[in-house]
Amino acid sequence: MSMKPFNAILIRDIKLASRSFGDVLTLVLFFIMIGVIIPFAIGPNKMLLASIAPGIIWMAAFLSSLLAIDRFFRADFEDGSLLAMRHANISLSAIAFAKLIALWVITILPLIIATPILAMMLFMDFEILIRTILSLLAGTPALIAFGGIGAAITVSLKRGGLIAPVLILPISIPILIFGISSIKANAGIGVESAAMLFLIAISLLAMVFAPFAIALALRLDQE
Amino acid sequence: MILRGANGIGKTSLLMALAGYLHIEAGLIGWEKTKQDDDEKTAYEDMHFISHQYAIKENLSLTENLKFWADMNGGSKDDVFMALEKAGLGHGADFEALMLSQGQKKRLSLARLLVSKKPIWLLDEPTSALDSEGDKWVASLIDNHLDDGGLVIAATHLDLPMKKNKRIKTIILGQDK
């Protein structure tokens, strides 16, 4: 297999996202919005806010990515691109893998870049911020992989809307658990690094197996 | 091969089954390979399927749209320009596909046939939305492809103005023999 079709999908999806930049911006604004309303809801207690900040950031990233799931395969499904791609010199699972990477770049990366803004509003330590960003980098690929499976299963439904998020919520909870415990400073010696390793393991496994699941689901969608 | 028949008789379904999208309950679809040297390739990679969906991204320019399919199916940048010229879209190559009319979109999706050479063409209503010039263009595409030894299976309810050719067969679905 040559890498040309793989790169073509990657570049095209990123180019499309950069031309409809509003979609990317909406997601980032939603992400920041959660950070804006939390201090109003909880009160301006700096200590309290700082201690729950990693959890809030993970929750915001989690909810924002759930929001984006429905778009993952819909455009390519509806305009016939997915059908035509099946005759290309590339397997459907490789197509799915390329799209997962592109999706991570266009949905998650902007959120991670916006994380310092949230950190500022929540009075986070610099050190904790770095660890939060690292845990997001380690955990979000799994989030995207599971989201991709949900999106592929529901893409043929005219009004998929919230079905995919509900579908993948249960299997995504472990990512949240390990994500948070890899940040906590007072969780006990060795706990953070163990959680971090688990998080990376989940992400790697999910990224390896999800493309095959997605390819299977997309084949069934088109019947 | 021309597939004809009333609306809803199953022309598109037959094409989709041939293209490998549909699971068939009974029977067998087989493609005979002429080249033995390439074991990894499946018949599906030797096909173009041009359906009523255009597979065009409106935010990309015509060249970018076609270049994507060239990268996917094999084909160079020169092939892209040539195909756009032949499809009569050469003058607007850098415009966004958003500006295209239905007929022009159809032409752009048919231009995929010219960018990458594949022996099997499955065409679903190739002349819908096209003007009479477009009809002639599609017919000449098919003529040339047959002359090159290619295979075309087209479902249509409009007459295609092709040259007389012994290899062209018409099957009318839903009729007793």
Image (tube, coloured by chain):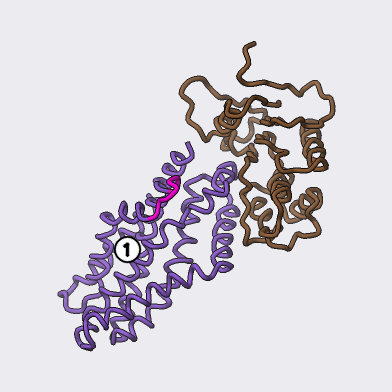
- Left or right of B29? Residue A109 is left
Identify the element where label 1 is drawn.
helix
Extreme residue in the top direction? B177
Q: Is residue B62 above or below residue A222?
A: below
Rendering coords of residue B156 (x, y %): 69, 31
Rendering coords of residue B14 (x, y %): 58, 28
- Left or right of A202? Residue B5 is right
B74 in the magenta segment: no
Q: Is residue B26 above or below residue B35?
A: above
Q: Which residues are magenta?
A: A155-161
Q: Is residue A59 above or below residue A220?
A: below
Q: Residue at x 58, y 65 (%)?
A: A15
- Left or right of A208? Residue B151 is right
Q: Which chain is brown?
A: B
Q: Quadrant of residue B81?
A: bottom right
Tell me what hue chain A is rendered in. Answer: purple
Q: Which residue is mark 1?
A: A200
Query: What secondary structure prevails in the magenta region?
Result: loop
Mark 1, Cα crowd under 10 Å, few <14 / some 14-19 / many 20+, is: many
